[in-house]
Image (cartoon, rainbow, N blue to C red):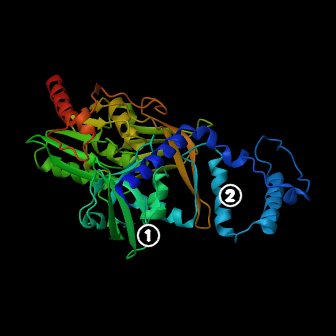
Amino acid sequence: MENGEGKNRFWKGVLVGALVMAFAGLILVGLSAGIFLIGRTVMGDQTQMAGGDSEDGGLDMDRISAKMRYIQDIIDRYFLFEEDPEAVEDGIYTGLMYGLGDPYSVYYNEENYASLLEDTSGEYCGIGAMVQQDLTTGIMTVVKVFEGSPALEAGMLPGDVIYEVDGENVTGRELDLVVNENIRGEEGTQVTVTVLRGETAEEVELIMERRQVEVTTVESQMLDEKTGYIYVMQFEMVTGGQFKEAVDRLEDQGMEQLIVDLRGNPGGVLDAAVEMLAYILPEDRMDGMLIYTADKDGKGDRYFCRDGKIVMESDSGYVTAGYPMEDGHQLDLPLAVLVNGSSASAAEVFTGAVMDYDAGIVVGTQTFGKGIVQSLVPLGDGTAVKLTTAHYYTPSGFDLHGEGLTPDVIVDLDEELKTQAVVDLDEDNQVQAAMEALETLKEAS
């Protein structure tokens, strides 16, 4: 394929993705309200469907079942191709969740549910690259290639734009679906990922063999003789332990102040953020509460750090204690948290608690503003639904959903740095601003 033709196809895909995002509100009802003209022949002997609206305003399952049977009868008699019953059934459940109009409430078939559990465990079978998606254009960009991974061996680079997987254009598709359905797979199988690289959008075809990968979600280093730096990419089940190890390692190296970088962190497992907070925040203020949630009836859960343990209290009366913290560890030194517009969900939980406790200074730009909780509900047959069930609040009661958090020190990344795939920390003006903020904290104390 010529480069010019490939780029044209790519930007057409971007345009389509942008249009899809712009008209998302209309598309949400498209599956249930769309009109399809199939002609008089098929409709000639239509039956009368019973039922009306349900008394409680919910779904009228009798009417829906009758309509489904009627549609299936049409399919059986007139559909040209062979029907895949399993795929159709999956589509029904997917459409049910899609009709809620909530992008975070979804149905997982057996394969996708298994992939989700694998993903949150911090271990999976794939290529070993971290990919982020622009929420406006749908463009997927490689932001991290893990050491010793198939992606690194194949020559994948940070900044590469994911264009095709096994010859299929994936621009504008949902990131989770592309990763779970196209990029990951059985160990030992091959996958071909075509990327667009550099300002010329050169097409580069990368062939790699999938294998088991353990995700390193936390990276750390000393920036100078006194400043520790911890970058948290996302929150998975392994993140809390990796974060504590990083803090301990930096303390052993003489760390006197710390920067926690949550820029580009999309969130993930709430427990990991809670575990990290309990390791560094004091227990003697705000009753040690780290976060609380409330459902549509105002009931929810409250997470505390008490007596060296994380405690969760529920309005249902359920109480659990776990995550014992070694010697009631607290981080009694200046702390700065770096955030940007892609810092979301669990990243905002962490940042909000730091702000409420006045335990550090937040630097960067306004965060994304995702303050709602999703609960994963297994359905007993290997499938599951993920459903938005509650708001979460910072310890002071702030609901950041749709608002985000405003940093104490607002500083945008320099324009010339935004075009770089990898930015050295000593050139990163936001990191430098965080170091200056730490000096201000030190002087104030």
* Residue 313 screen position, x and y as percent: 49, 44
* Residue 62 screen position, x and y as percent: 83, 54
Q: Residue furthest bottom?
A: 188
Residue carrying label 1: 185
Say what secondary structure mark 2 lies in: helix
The residue under label 1 is which amino acid type?
Answer: Gly
* Residue 424 screen position, x and y as percent: 17, 44
Dot 2 crowding, Cα within 10 Å, few <14, some 14–19, many 20+: few
Residue 147 relative to residue 71: left or right: left
Can you say whether 445 is above or below 65 in the image? above
In the rendered structure, find residue 92 and report the number of the disc placed on it: 2
Residue 38 relative to residue 128: left or right: right
The residue under label 2 is which amino acid type?
Answer: Ile
Say what secondary structure mark 1 lies in: loop
In primary-sequence order, the first of circles 2 and 1 is 2
Compare residues 340 and 208 and report the one nearer the observer: 208
Would you say the residues marked 2 and 1 are in contact, meaning their CB atoms lie under 8 Å apart? no
| Residue in view at x 53 percent, y 41 percent | 19
Compare residues 148 and 378 and report the one nearer the observer: 148
Compare residues 10 and 436 and report the one nearer the observer: 10
* Residue 309 screen position, x and y as percent: 36, 48
Residue 72 relative to residue 207: left or right: right
